[in-house]
Image (cartoon, rainbow, N blue to C red):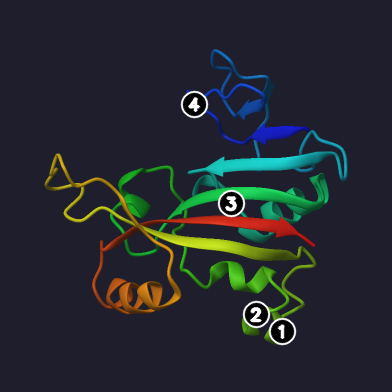
Amino acid sequence: MKKINLGAGTDIRKDFINHDIAKLEGIDIVHDLNVYPWPWQDNSIDEFLALDVLEHLNDFLKNMEEIHRILKVDGKIFLKVPYWNASSAYIDPTHKRGFHELTFDFLDPSKEYCKQRPYYTKARFKINSLTFVLNPFQPYISIPFLSNLKITSKIGKKIIGFFGNLFGNIILDLELELIKI
């Protein structure tokens, strides 16, 4: 099974091809993801891990098209991205964007946004899971016994999503699992 850890940085993972833009210790492939095509063959990879990567790149849809090109059918990508109105989306000066919980709906043909605007991209993924990551009071107050809370239930995401859109810095990140179709 071939797996790529995109933008690994210092998070080197065994059994993965570790990629980054910088030649750091443990990095197998050095490549700028804003330069196309990426250095992997079509339909050659089973799994991508992209934790805190997409927000650094110039063209979200083009990057998703590259992931789609490289993944095998039924291949998976595990993503973590900052929420659009979380401080984490803007603290890092290299971040170019944050993400809304419906952003990835434009890639899933079962979702209304993809049906309304199928011409945005040909990259198609099934959203297998979407999780809200909350860490109340961060980055201002650290509470030792309170770590990241993960909301996965449909009703929980509706309630938290409502308040997360109304007030900033409630939802810290989104975690997703997408499957290439």
Quadrant where the C terminus sits is bottom right
Give the crowd class for mark 1: few <14, some 14-19, many >=20 residues within 10 Å: some
Picture quadrant of residue 45 = top right
Is mark 3 in CB contact (under 8 Å) with mark 1? no
Secondary-structure class at tag 2? loop
- Is residue 178 toward the left or the right of residue 65 in the image? left
Q: Is residue 29 above or below residue 66?
A: above
Answer with mark 4 or mark 3, whichever residue precedes in sequence: 4
Question: Gap between marks 4 and 3, in whole Å?
Answer: 22 Å
**Front residue (pair 179, 8):** 179
Please give the residue where the numbered disc 4 appears in the rendered image. Answer: 11
| Residue type, numbered disc 2 | Lys
Question: Gap between marks 2 and 4, in whole Å?
Answer: 33 Å
Question: Gap between marks 3 and 2, in whole Å?
Answer: 25 Å
**Residue 148 appears in the picture as rendered:** yes
Residue 67 rendering spot, x and y as whole percentages: 73, 49
Answer with mark 3 or mark 2, whichever residue precedes in sequence: 3
Which tag is nearer the camera, tag 2 or tag 1? 2
Please give the residue where the numbered disc 3 appears in the rendered image. Answer: 58
Is mark 2 in CB contact (under 8 Å) with mark 1? yes
Residue 73 rendering spot, x and y as whole percentages: 84, 53
Give the crowd class for mark 4: few <14, some 14-19, many >=20 residues within 10 Å: few
| Residue type, numbered disc 4 | Asp
Question: Gap between marks 2 and 1, in whole Å?
Answer: 6 Å
Extreme-top residue of the structure:
25
Quadrant where the N terminus sits is top right
Residue 131 rendering spot, x and y as whole percentages: 45, 60
Answer with mark 3 or mark 1, whichever residue precedes in sequence: 3
Disc assigned to residue 146: none
Which tag is nearer the camera, tag 3 or tag 2? 2
**Front residue (pair 30, 4):** 4
- Tell me which residue sits at (46%, 57%) in the image: 97
